[in-house]
């Protein structure tokens, strides 16, 4: 690259390794300097509002310093916007006179995949010396600033496209949720108010037998109940034939997640015979009356806002855990139309869910393409492809 000089970060910048004060000096009252321990408060480009302050100052970063996460994960960067104290999860990189700080930021962004830490017993990490040894080529200062101007303008357009796509993605997801919730709030005149216990034979806890990493068939747990369907990853297994016979899942079984974090308690999934399996004691099988209740209708209802709000009302809570037992589950209010109407509703819901998932996939691919475009442009910028044309002519 014509007029580009090969150097290292240590040649061009001052690198300050973070050091954490003792926790007794921390506060949340705004006393002392803002304190950042890692990338938790990182924004897209600028670090966000601090959650802690410290009256004991160890290592400082200045406004305009680039902050790098140096422990799990390694490499993400942000700008400091005020004087702060940095803990051991961060390093500050202060640009010297030869390097434009924004050019440095984009350059480090282009090297995200190259910046690797050392694998320790607990964290992947990168130390001060390793940061200093990162190779960094740069052109004259005026050319750096010209490249930064191009990148700023280009990324502004890409970021607008990303924001619009994320909005479209959220709208696609909300479309299904909105329709689902409308079904169970705008009920027809022929709908009958019941308790879940009135339309099921019983509710049944799963196996309490210990599972293994390998075995005859999977044992579904609370983590396998997601978004109304069963997630077949992260499985455990059993070969206990007595347990298999007792808790063997049948087609259209509806499983209810009775214990977990508050966010996940009350979620249900429907078993569609994907693989032979049984279910663990964290889950409840609802043995519904098939002449009164369609399995898919029940599954959609229990994942609607109406049921979720009731779940919040009846669940018991302890530290980091919530619970809904079988007795409370049988007390859930449920409005039901005829079986025929239930099946017509579920057919429409499946059709809409298929269409919204198709849209979500399109928008997700677009987001990935836009991120790849950013990386492609960064690669071009830091391999000399955005260099001033007059420089190229000089090289000829």
Image (spheres, grey):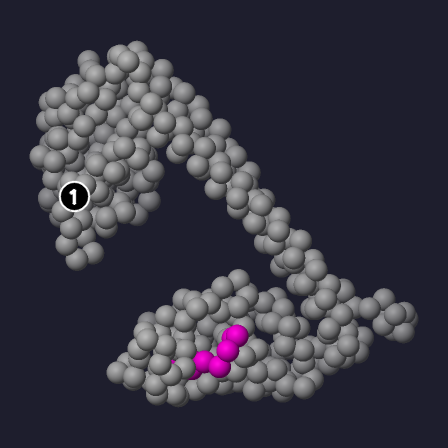
Where residue 56 sits, quadrant-wise, is: bottom left
Where residue 280 sits, quadrant-wise, is: top left
Q: Is residue 233 above or below residue 119?
A: above
Q: Is residue 110 visible?
A: yes
Dominant SS type (magenta)? loop
Asked whether, in this view, residue 173 is left or right of residue 114, the answer is left
Q: Nearer the viewer, residue 172 or 362?
A: 172
Q: Which type of secondary structure does the marked residue at label 1 adopt?
A: loop
- Magenta span of residues: 80-89
Q: Residue at x 16, y 26 (%)?
A: 196
Asked whether, in this view, residue 116 is left or right of residue 255, the answer is right
Where residue 327 sits, quadrant-wise, is: top left
Q: Is residue 87 magenta?
A: yes
Q: Which residue is mark 1?
A: 315
Q: Nearer the viewer, residue 355 or 34?
A: 34
Quarter occupied by the N terminus: bottom right
Q: Is residue 391 magenta?
A: no
């Amino acid at each position: 690259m014509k007029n580009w000089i090969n150097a290292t970060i240590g040649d061009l910048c001052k690198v300050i390794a973070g050091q954490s004060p003792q926790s007794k000096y921390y506060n949340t009252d705004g006393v002392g300097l803002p304190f950042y321990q890692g990338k938790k408060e990182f924004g897209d480009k600028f670090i966000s509002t601090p959650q802690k302050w410290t009256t004991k100052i160890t290592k400082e970063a200045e406004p305009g310093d680039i902050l790098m996460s140096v422990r799990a994960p390694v490499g993400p960067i942000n700008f400091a916007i005020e004087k702060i104290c940095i803990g051991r999860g961060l390093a500050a990189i202060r640009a010297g006179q030869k390097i434009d700080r924004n050019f440095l930021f984009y350059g480090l962004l282009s090297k995200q995949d190259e910046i690797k830490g050392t694998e320790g017993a607990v964290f992947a990490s990168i130390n001060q010396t390793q940061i200093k040894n990162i190779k960094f080529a740069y052109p004259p200062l005026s050319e750096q600033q010209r490249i930064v101007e191009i990148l700023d303008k280009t990324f502004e357009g890409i970021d607008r496209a990303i924001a619009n796509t994320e909005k479209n993605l959220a709208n696609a997801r909300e479309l299904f949720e909105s329709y689902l919730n409308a079904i169970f709030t705008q009920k027809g005149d022929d709908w009958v108010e019941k308790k879940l216990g009135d339309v099921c034979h019983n509710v049944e806890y799963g196996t309490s037998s210990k599972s293994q990493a390998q075995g005859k068939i999977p044992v579904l747990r609370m983590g396998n109940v997601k978004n109304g369907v069963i997630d077949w990853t992260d499985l455990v297994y059993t070969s206990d034939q007595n347990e298999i016979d007792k808790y063997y899942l049948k087609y259209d079984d509806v499983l209810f997640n009775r214990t977990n974090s508050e966010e996940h308690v009350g979620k249900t999934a429907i078993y569609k015979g994907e693989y032979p399996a049984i279910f663990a004691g964290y889950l409840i099988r609802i043995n519904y009356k098939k002449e009164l209740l369609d399995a898919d209708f029940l599954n959609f209802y229990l994942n609607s806002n109406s049921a979720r709000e009731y779940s919040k009302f009846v669940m018991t809570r302890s530290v980091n855990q919530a619970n809904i037992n079988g007795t409370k589950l049988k007390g859930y209010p449920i409005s039901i139309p005829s079986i025929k109407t239930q099946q017509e509703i579920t057919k429409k819901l499946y059709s809409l869910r298929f269409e919204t998932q198709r849209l979500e996939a399109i928008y997700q691919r677009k987001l990935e393409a836009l991120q790849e475009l950013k990386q492609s442009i960064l690669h071009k910028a830091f391999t000399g492809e955005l260099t001033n044309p007059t420089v190229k002519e000089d090289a000829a």
